[in-house]
Image (cartoon, helix red, strand yellow):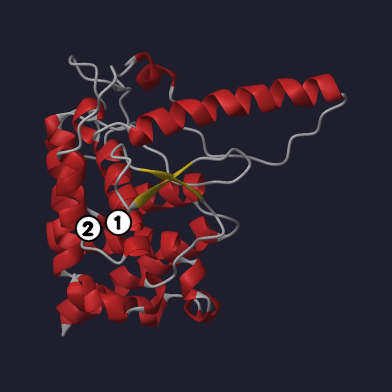
Amino acid sequence: MEAASSSAFLLCPNSTKTHLCSLSNPSSSVAVPCLSHGIKCLRLAASLPSVYTSIQNDSKDVIPKLDETGKFCSPRAARELALVILYAACLDGSDPVRLFERRLNDARDSEYDKAFLMAYDYMSFGGPPVTVTSSAEADDISQIDRKQSEIEAEILSAPPKLVYSKLVLRFSRKLLVAVSENWNNDVQAIEKIAPPNWMKEAGGRILEFSVLHLAMAEIAVLGTRHQIVINEAVDLAKRFCDGAAPRIINGCLRNFILQLNNQTDE
């Protein structure tokens, strides 16, 4: 992804939307985002089918959160892991595939508590501000938020091999390879479909552009049905982005599909 370093949104050293925690290797200079409640940021999760081939199916069946080994097992988990890695790579100006492989080799000295996987709220899409009637109620909510932040930080700092199944890791890497291979094409497409205000403040929209890159690469390179990819991208934006981002990303990707169809017709 060397050619991508010229893109403005890759060069922003900080994001006002997220708090960063270091990778599980304390000596690493790369950071990955974690959640500080009240601010939406990147988190790892799982919510879709438990087999890799099911990413091609628009199934609405209730599926398990974890596989038989106690690890996240869904395509949603793979997409979110890829988003975490891509976002961190953009902040660091590094290659996302190489960063992914470095994280796979991370070691953890202390024992990992798998109870965090079950406690992780992988379908939280935020909501309106909470109104409280007393300081005690506010303290209770703050305590819950702190506990959830601890769970998310534990999952984010854990080596991926401890958290994700082999199928998830394989699909995440496949997504990141697709992003790298199609980067320049997608940068040109984003310049046409992204709102002008996003392009003007590109350094503050790294997360949103990362969602777009992942979705566009999955559609154009991997050939996943665009209905599935758009739904997944909108859900990622609902969880991790601010304001109107889900609606805007939905519109951007639908315009991207129209452009792809027009190129096919020509």
102 in relation to 150, above or below: below
Residue 210 percent across, percent down from the top left = 36, 61
Circle 2 Cα neighbour tier, 10 Å, few/some/many (<14 / 14–19 / ≥20): many
Q: Residue at x 12, y 32 (%)?
A: 166
Residue 111 percent across, percent down from the top left = 28, 16
Quarter of the C terminus within the rendering: bottom left
Q: Which residue is mark 1?
A: 86
Q: Residue at x 47, y 72 (%)?
A: 203
- Splitting the image into 4 quarters, where does residue 27 fall? top left
Q: In this view of the protein, which residue sits in the foreground, 197 or 234?
A: 197
> Is 174 situated left or right of 254 in this image?
left
Q: Which mark is residue 234?
A: none
Q: In this view of the protein, which residue sits in the foreground, 40 or 104?
A: 104
Q: Three-letter amino acid code at disc 2?
A: Pro
Q: Considering the numbered disc 2 on the image, is that residue within a helix, a strand or a loop?
A: helix
Q: Three-letter amino acid code at disc 1?
A: Leu
- Splitting the image into 4 quarters, where does residue 262 fall? bottom left
The Cα atoms of the two marked residues, 1 and 2, are separated by 5 Å
**Is the residue under label 2 in contact with that under label 1 (CB below 8 Å)?**
yes
The outermost residue toward the front is 27
Q: Residue at x 82, y 29 (%)?
A: 132
> Is 142 situated left or right of 55 in this image?
right
Q: Considering the numbered disc 1 on the image, is that residue within a helix, a strand or a loop?
A: helix
Q: Which mark is residue 96?
A: 2
Circle 1 Cα neighbour tier, 10 Å, few/some/many (<14 / 14–19 / ≥20): many
Q: Residue at x 37, y 50 (%)?
A: 31
